[in-house]
Amino acid sequence: MRTLTRLIFLVLLIATLFSGWLYLHVHSEINLPATPYEFTIAPGSNLKQVSKQLSNAGVLVHDWSFVLLSRYMGNESEIKAGDYTLTEKISQVALLKYLIEGDVKQNEIKFLEGWTFSQVRELLNTHSAIKNDTASLSEQEILQLIGATETAAEGLFFPDTYYFIRDSSDVEILQRAYHTMQNHLQSAWSTRQESLPLKTPYEALILASIVEKETGLESDRAEIAGVFINRLRIGMRLQTDPTVIYGMGDKFDGNLRKKDLQTDQAYNTYTRAGLPPTPIAMPGLSSIQAALNPAETKAIYFVAKGNGESQFSTNLTDHNRAVNKYQRQQKQ
């Protein structure tokens, strides 16, 4: 009986000493490998994997103590993936709270309205936090990877700021941008004006990209869209410079000449009727909405005033007068 009592006492003593040691251990400051120390928890990582990762990096002395702490706190499944930065020494208890709250460092990439797909690819390929899985792929291979049904990538990605964890694949980012564009486009298509000369959401996307390139002024978008809709309705050519410039590609030197407008190519809306074959850039939401809900206008002409605004005309005589006026002002 005395032996059993001693054994129980010894077990209790060891448990008490271990509990005291563990308490002090998890509340003691961790010596960081570097200051600041940055690390990434990959999506899908479980508690043991995270603990082993931090132990291998020298952040934790014992990976099992962090596992034990997490299970005791009931937080073993609440650790969030992301990029983290530790700027000062921290205890295991504080570290666990930090990982549960998910106070992650946000990596971001911004696609701008009016950008072309080549500009998007260039930014993706040079971003230091992105894994470039598409750098050597063709446009068609990229579309197949992200599940797109279109045959050309231009205009398919919604201009916005996208947040991601370090070493995310550019495929994932493009996929998100593509689906975001599809959602916005389908939503706008469902609330479009009746009797528009646009047969599909993709045609609306093409027109929206032209509107995007023709003006950066919010108040002019709907009316410019109205001009193009009027031209499509009466069979008049769109005659818009941005499509010609896009079709010229690297041949465009910054100066659009009369011969460029007269040289036929797939995107020359001076020589060809109807919409060009694809969008010419990424339109923003305002341009998409303008294309599908254009202003009710009788205008079929417009010219840039030089201050961001446009002058609209219902006939060629007034349009030529406006062209002469604002071109003369710009020269002066």
Image: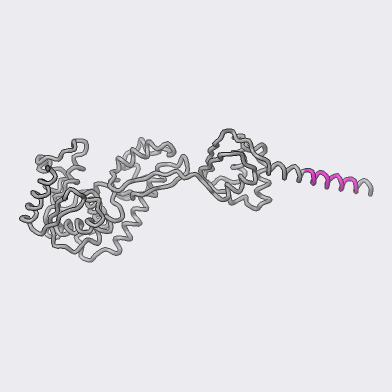
The percent position of residue 279, horizontal first and vertical second, equals 24, 49
Q: What secondary structure prevails in the magenta region? A: helix
Task: Please tell me which residue lies in front, 98 or 73.
Answer: 98
**Residue located at (83% from left, 45% from top):** 13
Left or right, 81 with reference to 250 = right
**Residue located at (39% from left, 49% from top):** 176
Look at the picture and state if 95 lies above or below 290. above
Task: Please tell me which residue lies in front, 125 or 163.
Answer: 163
Left or right, 300 with reference to 40 = left
Task: Please tell me which residue lies in front, 191 or 44.
Answer: 191
- Residue 173 sits in which quadrant? top left
The percent position of residue 99, horizontal first and vertical second, equals 57, 47
| Residue that lies at the very extreme toward the left in this rendered image | 317
Name the colour scheme.
one colour
| Residue that lies at the very extreme toward the bottom in this rendered image | 194
- Residue 300 sits in which quadrant? bottom left
Q: Is residue 16 magenta?
A: yes
Left or right, 220 with reference to 318 = right
Q: Magenta part of the protein: which range?
A: 5-17
Left or right, 92 with reference to 171 = right
Q: Is residue 300 magenta?
A: no
**Residue located at (68% from left, 44% from top):** 27
Q: How many marks?
A: 0
The percent position of residue 131, horizontal first and vertical second, equals 43, 38
- Quadrant of image for the C terminus: top left
